[in-house]
Image: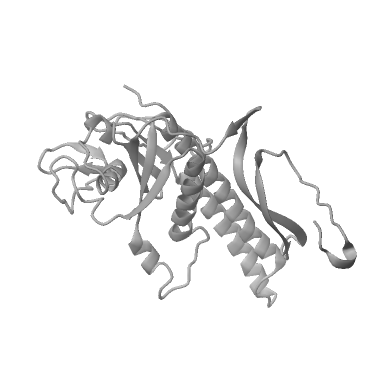
Amino acid sequence: MRRLGKFGKLKIQFKGRIHLKGKQGRLEIIYDDVKRKWYAHISLTVDEKLEGEEWVKVPKEPLGNLSAGIDLGVNNLMAVYVENGESFLVNGRSLKSIDFYWRGKIADYQSKLNKSGAKTSRKLKRMHEKAKLQAKHYINTAVRQTVKRLYELGVSRIVVGYPKGIARNSGKGKRRNFLLSHVWRFNTVIKRLTEVAEEYGISVVVVGEAFTSQTCPLCGQRHSDARFVRGLFKCRREGVVMNADLVGAFNILRKVKAITPSLEGLKAFKVRGNWPKTGPEGSKTQFVLGLNETPQTSLPLG
């Protein structure tokens, strides 16, 4: 760093392994009053990225020209439907577990603070920060593996549905009593999807989710009572049972592209716990992630 007046020149050591190459931009030095440490942040226009032991140029060229729809949720962080009929689910229950764990710890500590007459402390701020860091790590891993999987499938465009109603009602009339709100969760996922997809040359389009959870992919009609069981969607006209989140992902994709539904792609069945169990007739398990596992995607079975 130059032009520091009487300080002359300042050298800053990089911590960790350098995994990006490119043109450096502006550097900013910021003080974190919670950690009580100084941090240097520098922007970088990335040209190459280290993958394993090999430097790879970015952005990559998409392997195909397919589009994929993604429905964001809570139990399933992402339901993904590709126009060729491929589909998979990404578990979101670990984020709920992180939220539940830190809510309990913070509530206990907050109670002790209140009894002492204090409203906040450095430790309390640090606890909030740790909760967000854990959640961000899970989201980042899940998003990166999802985008990589879509890249390998030949996807060049991702269409993400955003539930506007949650954003409108999230902060009105009441104080938020949980850390990782749906608004924060969805915004973080979309932000990371956009950033990671850019590395693979994949574009991301955000659309509204209106009626995507009610419209049947088979008959095209809206069924307000289609979700007869949690997580399942039944077409009253055809009598076919499908995964509700994948129905949403399909309809999100159909907002920007005319596609023909694949029953196999819509019948993926997500169960509670770590292992597949018997589901509705004709259903199959395409992706099951246990609560304590690392996010990953898998090839469809069958």
Residue at the spot 39% in from the left edge and 31% down from the top edge: 154
Judged left or right of residue 46, residue 72 is: left
Position in image of residue 138 (x %, y %): 54, 44
Q: Is residue 215 left or right of residue 159?
A: left
**Location of residue 176 in the rendering, given as x and y in whole percent from the top left corner:** 48, 68
Outermost residue to the top: 302
Q: Residue furthest left?
A: 237
Residue nearer the viewer, 179 or 214 = 214
Task: Locate the C terminus and report the quarter of the image it occupies.
Answer: top left
Closer-to-camera residue (211/178): 211
> Does residue 152 show up?
yes
Give the image location of residue 89, x and y in percent.
38, 38
Whether residue 290 is visible to the viewer of this picture, yes or no, is no
Q: Is residue 72 above or below residue 144?
A: below
The residue sitting at 90% across, 67% down in the picture is 6
Residue found at the far bottom of this picture:
117
Residue 91 at x, y percent in the picture: 44, 41
Say which quarter of the image contains residue 15. top right
Would residue 238 be found to the left or right of residue 92 on screen? left
